[in-house]
Image (spheres, coloured by chain):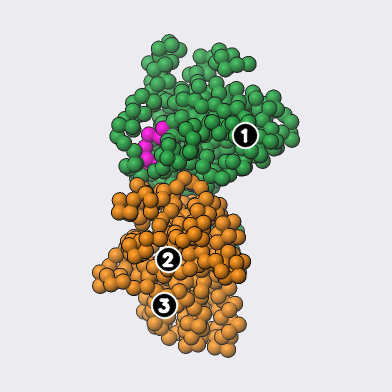
Amino acid sequence: MTGKDFMSALSEKAKINMLKGLIEIRKFEEKSIELYKTGKIRGYLHPCIGQEAIPVGACRAIGRKDYIISNHRGHGHCIARGADIRKIMAELFGKSDGYCGGRGGSMHIADMDLGILGENGIVGGGIPISVGAGLSCKMDDKGNVVLCFFGDGAANNGVFHESLNMSAILKLPVIYICENNMYAISMCSTDSVACEDIGKRSCAYDIPGHIIDGSDPLKVYESVGIAVKHAREGKGPSLIEAKTYRFYGHHPNDPGQYRGKEEVGYYTSQKDPVTNFKRRLLEEKIITAEEIDKIEKRADEKIKDAVIFASESREPDLKKFLRENKQD
Amino acid sequence: MREIEYREAIREAVTEEMDRDREVFLIGEDIGVYQGAFKVYKGLLDKYGPGRVINTPISETAIIGAAIGAALTGYRPIAEIMFIDFAALAMDQIANQAAKIHFMSGGSIDVPLVIRTQGGVGKGLSAQHSQSLESWFYHIPGLKVAMPSTAYDAKGLLKTAVRDNGPVIFIEHKMIYPVKGPVPEKEYTIPFGKADIKRRGRDITILAYANMVLKSLEAAEEMEREGVDCEIIDPRTLVPLDIDAIIDSVKKTGRLLIVSEACRRGSVASDISARVTEKAFEYLKAPVKIVAGLNTPIAYNLALEQASIPQKADILEAVKSIIKK
Ligand SMILES: Cc1ncc(C[n+]2csc(CCOP(=O)(O)OP(=O)(O)O)c2C)c(N)n1
């Protein structure tokens, strides 16, 4: 099956679902920034606004039994994979009904029922773990695959090389998805990466490499689909570099002064995955403005409900925690 | 005397050493335009340029390796590991390389290297950004370990670290960066292995370092109102450790409480307790007590987070229980 076949197999309903995903992630992140600023959420929060098309496109290209591995900017991955936003929000509030019972916070959401093997606070920390998840899939021999998400910054850590090489020699079903949003905190990927495209590093491991526009969920869906098929056929890993942009600072307290206004203006106006995909579906007459409106309202309600759920959730049981960790 | 922030004191030490010695340079993540995750290097890129303020990719092993290699060949790098938690990624270079080269070469090779990093709990950063890992470095022969609790100490110790010919792990605490303290304008250095008595007292010795010094000082104020006179001793460097000063204080008070934010198991606190007990048992009126972090990863939730490390109330309770004996 080629990329074209994948795309034609994608129904209008599936495309509308993708738009729902994009909108939900965008709104969730906007709400979490707002709540961070009012002090409801503490610690580090890394919103993925601007990058939504990657998790949405990628997660639609895999099945129920597959796995994903996320990073510190991981809410989008989890939501696209079907995680319960009420439980994510409760975790951001540090509450007992959160995914980690309030122990993990924004950077450590995991849901084994959905094959979400975890976000990570260590940049690149999930990349070697993907090798083991891939190994399990290979040993199980059921055709399952692993999507491993990480940033351009993570691609410069030594673990990237060890893991891709090992996955390649063992022909593991892992799809490495590098979300190149051009910055690792303040360092621009043109300064931090020696070659022009991280995707080109696939040559070093003799695996397929894809370099794609990460603002387009259909492009992401297509390349991930091709890589997943390759992996399911036992042919080993692929590396996908999705070019993208984070619209805001590294976290809500980062004004992002290391980026030029023009650059930010270009991406936010030309490469907004939500706006662009809306426009596209309208142009293709797949959806009407009223229907989009409904989707947005529905997303607002869901998020409102998640905030209420999080607010009403109990604090973790401190006494129990102390009992479990009693020192003598 | 003027008062400046802990982070400013560190910056002053770096600046003075860079001005004094052209061989000193900085290397690390987000230390250029970003000025460091805690803004310690404010203005330094402008002042020294990218040749001496080397901003790197997220490559902890290569950062430390680069610093070691430069140190072997004539320079005096100050490498930064943004969070002590990330030192785990560079541990071969730190523990097997930097720490061993001088010894393995029969003492013929020096590694004049400073690794600045920061640790500790307090900002809701959860398990991978809140650890107190000083015992890892304390345990490895060949490394020196400094852990300043005040702006004054940070400046004086960092200057000494830069001039030291061996690898120094310089561990700052994220909660102390904005804390102001008196720092003289005139140049000074603080020798390694010399403890500082942060508060004089007769009844009990409290040994604390880093942020626990600040918490212990608060507790001591409160104990004073109850008629108990605490002496607070801050070793400032864990390696070398000023064990004599600790023992002298214990001889005077007859009681020792060690307060440490790090998990208790395998901690520096446990080791100091053993050393004092061996050397000064006959002076102790009560068993040495340790108030330390719980043996747990740090949680995100504020209440769980704070319950995992010593609080003023824990220190007060411990002091009272020792005094009673
Ligand atoms: C090993 C490690 N080094 C440094 C950091 C601090 N840090 C957190 S996020 C980040 C930037 C990551 O960049 P990238 O992988 O491109 O992801 P992005 O934040 O752009 O999504 C850095 C340096 C860390 N968490 N872990």
Can residue B308 be seen here? The reply is: no
Pointer 3 residue: B196
- The CA span between labels 2 and 3 is 20 Å
Q: Is residue A81 left or right of residue A22?
A: right
Question: Helix, strand or loop at disc 3?
Answer: strand
In terms of image quadrants, where is residue A250?
A: top left
For discs 1 and 3, the disc positioned in front in the rendered view: 1
Residue most extreme to the top: A285
- The CA span between labels 2 and 1 is 41 Å
Chain B: colour as depicted: orange
* Residue B259 x/y as whole percent: 49, 71
Question: Helix, strand or loop at disc 1?
Answer: helix
Q: Tell me the subunit letter for badge 3.
A: B
- What kind of residue is marked 2? Val
Question: Helix, strand or loop at disc 2?
Answer: helix
Which residue is depicted at the point 62% across and 30% down?
Answer: A207
Pointer 2 residue: B162
**Do circles 1 and 3 both sit on a common chain?**
no
